[in-house]
Image (tube, rainbow, N blue to C red):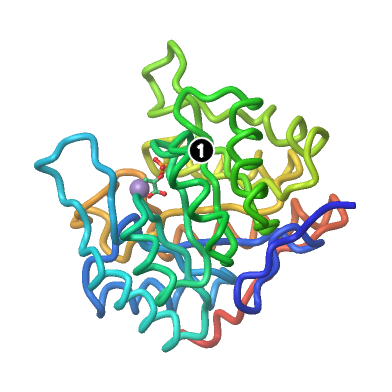
């Protein structure tokens, strides 16, 4: 029996392919609201936005912290979408629990066992990214740390791994999708945005993920990608995102699944 995670009204792991979308980072209320409205109208069922950003350089934008979580919650409420945001330590987890519906453990923290245990005790669904250089086995053991604390609502997210190939930001391990679905009862979703690193590759990778049986997608969308404070080159515009969701609907249907299409009339 496959397990599912319930995030607000959204279910990850059922017949529907869940679509999580939003900007890399929460930047301001108006921008986030614009993105949230369009991704919801296109069919997204969960809104993402980072408030605690683990950046490679300490001089890069680190996120708005608690204020970012607060804005995400406010926008989620305004448009009627549940929310997910990354936590980096026990303090940010504590804050996130009051604001968001699902907590994300990022690739860089996949083996932060103290954090894994803490989200395991937290009682909210957890999105567990695969580490940059983690084997499938290590990833599944990381999920086990969370479940060992009594939290069964774990969703695995393949986001690309580091290989010898620098032409893409990471190498999306599509094989991990059917493999993990065979090895584990947990839902597995794919983040094509961080794997690709540039927007031209995001839609084809997203289509491949759904074709491979992914239970959902995590996609970065920004209303003005060229002005994004984080990961702009890989962000889809709301228009790109709407087109992609329509394509995914057909791919899912061919496999006996569905991708919600939302109501684009709502923003026309
Ligand atoms: C993110 O989702 O914004 C993120 C930082 O992803 P990852 O941990 O996969 O790099
Ligand atoms: Mn990002």
Q: Is residue 6 above or below residue 247?
A: below
Q: Quadrant of residue 120?
A: bottom right
Which quadrant of the frame does ligand 1 lie within? top left
Residue under label 1, please give it.
Answer: 159
Q: How many marks?
A: 1
> What residue occupies the far top of the structure in this picture?
164
Q: Is residue 242 left or right of residue 55?
A: right
Towards the viewer: 209 or 14: 14
The x and y percentages for residue 178 are: 77, 34
Towards the viewer: 21 or 93: 93
The x and y percentages for residue 177 are: 70, 36
Instruction: Name the residue: 42% across, 54% down.
Output: 220
Instruction: Name the residue: 27% across, 73% down.
Output: 31
The x and y percentages for residue 51 are: 29, 61
The x and y percentages for residue 224 are: 26, 62
Instruction: Name the residue: 75% across, 57% down.
Output: 13
The residue carrying mark 1 has its beta carbon less than 8 Å from ligand 1: yes
Secondary element at image label 1: loop
Q: Quadrant of residue 78?
A: bottom left
């Amino acid at each position: 029996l496959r397990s599912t995670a319930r995030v607000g009204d959204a279910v990850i792991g059922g017949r529907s392919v869940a679509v999580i979308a939003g900007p890399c980072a929460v930047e301001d209320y108006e921008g986030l609201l614009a993105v949230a409205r369009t991704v919801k109208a296109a069919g997204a069922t969960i809104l993402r936005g980072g408030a605690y950003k683990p950046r490679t350089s300490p001089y890069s934008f680190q996120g708005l912290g608690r204020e970012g979580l607060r804005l995400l919650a406010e926008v989620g409420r305004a448009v009627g979408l549940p929310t997910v945001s990354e936590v980096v330590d026990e303090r940010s987890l504590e804050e996130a629990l009051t604001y968001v519906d699902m907590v994300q453990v990022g690739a860089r923290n996949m083996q932060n066992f103290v954090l894994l245990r803490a989200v395991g005790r937290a009682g909210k669904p957890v999105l567990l990214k695969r580490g940059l250089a983690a084997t499938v086995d290590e990833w599944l053991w990381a999920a086990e740390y969370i479940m060992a604390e009594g939290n069964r609502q774990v969703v695995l997210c393949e986001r690309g791994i580091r290989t010898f190939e620098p032409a893409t930001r990471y190498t999306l391990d599509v094989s991990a999708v059917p493999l993990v679905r065979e090895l584990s009862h947990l839902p597995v979703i794919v983040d094509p945005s961080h794997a690709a690193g540039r927007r031209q590759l995001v839609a084809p990778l997203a289509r491949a993920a759904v074709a491979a049986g992914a239970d959902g997608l995590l996609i970065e969308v920004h209303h003005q990608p060229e002005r994004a404070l984080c990961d702009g080159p890989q962000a889809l515009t709301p228009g790109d995102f709407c087109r992609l969701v329509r394509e995914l609907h057909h791919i899912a249907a061919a496999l006996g699944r569905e991708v919600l299409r939302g109501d684009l009339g709502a923003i026309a």
